[in-house]
Image: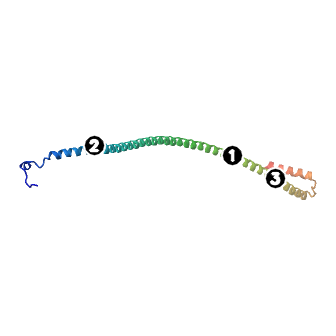
Amino acid sequence: MSFRTSASEAAANPLIPHTAELIVGFIAFTLLFLVLRSKVVPMFEKAFTARTEAIQGGMDKAEKAQRAAEIALEKYTAQLSEARGEAQEIREEARVQGAAIINDLRTKAQDEAERITAAATASIEAERQKAITSLRNEVGSLATDLASKIVGEALDDQVRQSRIVDRFLDDLEKSN
C-alpha cells in the first residue's frame, strides 16, 4: 500500500462520487424500487382501497340511517297529529256527552221534584182531610154534648147527630 496520493486523486473533487459508486447506487436503487413497487405499493393500495370502501360504506349507512330517521320522524309527526286530532274529538264527544248527562239529570231531578211535590201535596191533602174528619167528629161530639145539656134531652140518635153536626159546620164555614 502506498501512502501516496496521486495528483489525479488530489485533483478529484470530494463532492462528486466515483463512477463505480454511481453504478452500484443506481442498481441498488432500481432493485429497491422494483421490490417496493411489486410488494409494498400493492399492499398500500389495497389498504387505501379497503379504507375508502369502509368510509364509503359508512357514509352510505349513515345516509340510509338518516333517511330512515327522517321517515320515522315524518311517521311520528303524522301519528302525533292524528293522536291530537283524536284527542280533540274525544274531548268534544265527552263534552257533548257531559252536557247530555247534565240535561238528563236535570230532567230527572225536576221529574223527581215534581213527583215528591205531588206526593207531598197528596199527603198534605190526605192529612188535611183526616184532620177535618177528626175535627168534625170531635166538634160534632162536643156539639151534641153541649146541645144535649142545653136542650136537656139526649141526642143519642147517630143519624140525627150527624145531620146536626154537618149543618153546624156548614154554617161555620159560610160565616168565615
Residue 133 drawn at (x, y percent)? 83, 52
Q: Is disc 3 placed on a helix, strand or loop? A: helix
Residue 78 drawn at (x, y percent)? 50, 40
Q: Residue at x 31, y 42 (%)?
A: 38
Task: Give the amino acid type for the residue marked by disc 1 in the picture.
Answer: Lys
Q: Which mark is residue 130?
A: 3
Give the spatial CA distance, label 2 vs label 3: 137 Å
Give neighbour class at mark 1: few <14, some 14-19, many 20+ (Cα, 10 Å).
few
Q: Residue at x 46, y 41 (%)?
A: 68
**Chain-order first, disc 1 or disc 2:** 2
In the orientation shown, which residue stands out farthest toward the left? 7
**Chain-order first, disc 3 or disc 1:** 1
Residue 47 vs residue 15, the one in the foreground:
15
Q: What residue sits right under mark 2 in the picture?
A: 34
- Asked whether the beta carbons under mark 3 and mark 1 sit within 8 Å of each other, the answer is no
Task: Give the amino acid type for the residue marked by disc 2 in the picture.
Answer: Leu
**Chain-order first, disc 2 or disc 3:** 2
Give the side of residue 129 with respect to residue 11, left or right.
Answer: right
Q: Is disc 1 placed on a helix, strand or loop? A: helix
Give the spatial CA distance, label 3 vs label 1: 32 Å
Of marks 3 and 1, the one in the foreground:
1
Q: Residue at x 42, y 43 (%)?
A: 62
In the orientation shown, which residue stands out farthest toward the front? 1
Give the side of residue 22 with respect to residue 60, left or right.
Answer: left
Here the colouring is: rainbow
Give neighbour class at mark 2: few <14, some 14-19, many 20+ (Cα, 10 Å).
few
Q: What residue sits right under mark 1 in the picture?
A: 108
